[in-house]
Image (spheres, rainbow, N blue to C red):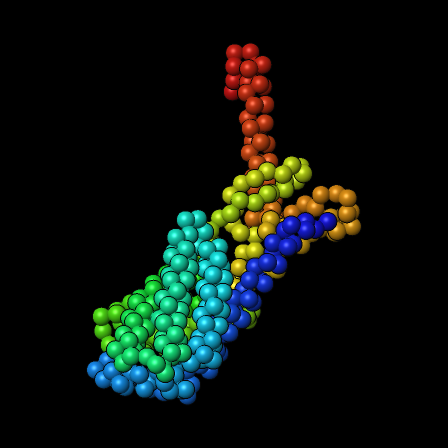
Amino acid sequence: MTDPVSTSGAAAWPRLGRVTGLAGLATIVPILVAVVGTREEPSFTATATEFLTYYRSPDTDATPFRSFLFTVGLVTFVWFVVGLSVLLRRAEGEAAWRSAIAMGSGVLFVALGRSGLGNEAAVAFRAGDLDHQIARYAFDQGQAAFVNGRVALGSCAVCCGWVIASTRFLPRWLGWLAIASGAGLALSRISQIWLLPYLMFWLWVITVAVLLLTPELPRRRPARLNPVSCNVIHPDRRATKRECLHPSTQLSDHPLTLMLGHVATGTPRRRSRKARTDKGSVPQASEDGCGVSRRVRRSVSLTRWLLSLGRSVGSMGGVVARERPGGVTS
């Protein structure tokens, strides 16, 4: 019989991967729609009148509809960051501090971005009777929030890329792309080069989302999964607990299949004919739940039998020697 708890737990990881991938793609669409067709922002050296004219224009990202699309994009980005952090935490194993930092940094980016966008939206709503200097201050405050948010976004990208490059949960080049874009975003706080790493980051988001939605893509190397505790059923039907590799590593060498595959933790890949027919008996694991094949177990059993046979022969020889008068004679 199949354990319903193990089955539901195995189905939760593929569902999380699909939701995370959909959230990543859903983040791009509203933000892209909100940006397309907007008016060019004034420079920091522009006059106060130009800032007020900018906020009174219906083609800015501070208008009610465009700010709503930005809000939807930021909320779905929270879904993406949280889901990806949970997946990376499972790949990272014990002391998953990098995935935790990635989650916190992503949420901080959304908070800073929503703060600046909300301030500009309020100014655009009251632009008809607003002072020129207040419009300039609102613009500067929104830009400062966006610049500081890029630092938090860079921290999120660096931590995600670090986990991906070290565990190979996704292709390793994707981890290095995240690290490069994250470093560029963090350094953009003190430089004027921010557009390239910003575009690199969103390209990384799209690629990760597509890979999470298509986990059957080929890979060279398997993911490095940390050992987990699982129950092992021995031939004498006595269940013990020990440290073993994740049981899904014996199914495929694709990392997303390992992490998101429909595999119940601690259950074997296939059962014997007797275990399939006899539903009342406890199924004996075909590979001990730890990737140990039948050939290895038979070799160990044969070695133990030969050692016991050698000890038995040696003890019999000693008994015969003691029974001879005068010990061993030629």
Identity of the residue drawn at 59% across and 38% down = 240
Give the camera-side residue of 49 and 175: 49
Give the camera-side residue of 129 and 201: 129
Residue 150 visible (yes or no)? no
Identity of the residue drawn at 56% across and 67% down = 18
Give the camera-side residue of 267 and 206: 206
Residue 289 visible (yes or no)? yes
Identity of the residue drawn at 42% across and 81% down = 63
Give the camera-side residue of 215 and 155: 155
* Residue positioned most to the front: 129
Name the spot of residue 278 as percent of width and height, x first: 78, 47
* Residue positioned most to the top: 325
Name the spot of residue 35 as percent of width and height, x first: 41, 82
Left or right of residue 242: residue 37: left
How many marks do you count on the picture? 0
Left or right of residue 192: residue 165: right
Left or right of residue 86: residue 302: right
Q: Which quarter of the figure has residue 154? A: bottom left
Name the spot of residue 218 as percent of width and height, x first: 52, 70
Identity of the residue drawn at 27% across and 86% down = 50
Name the spot of residue 285 as percent of width and height, x first: 65, 47
Position of residue 307 relative to residue 110, above or below, is: above
Q: Which quarter of the figure has residue 299? A: top right
Position of residue 137 relative to residue 99, above or below, is: below
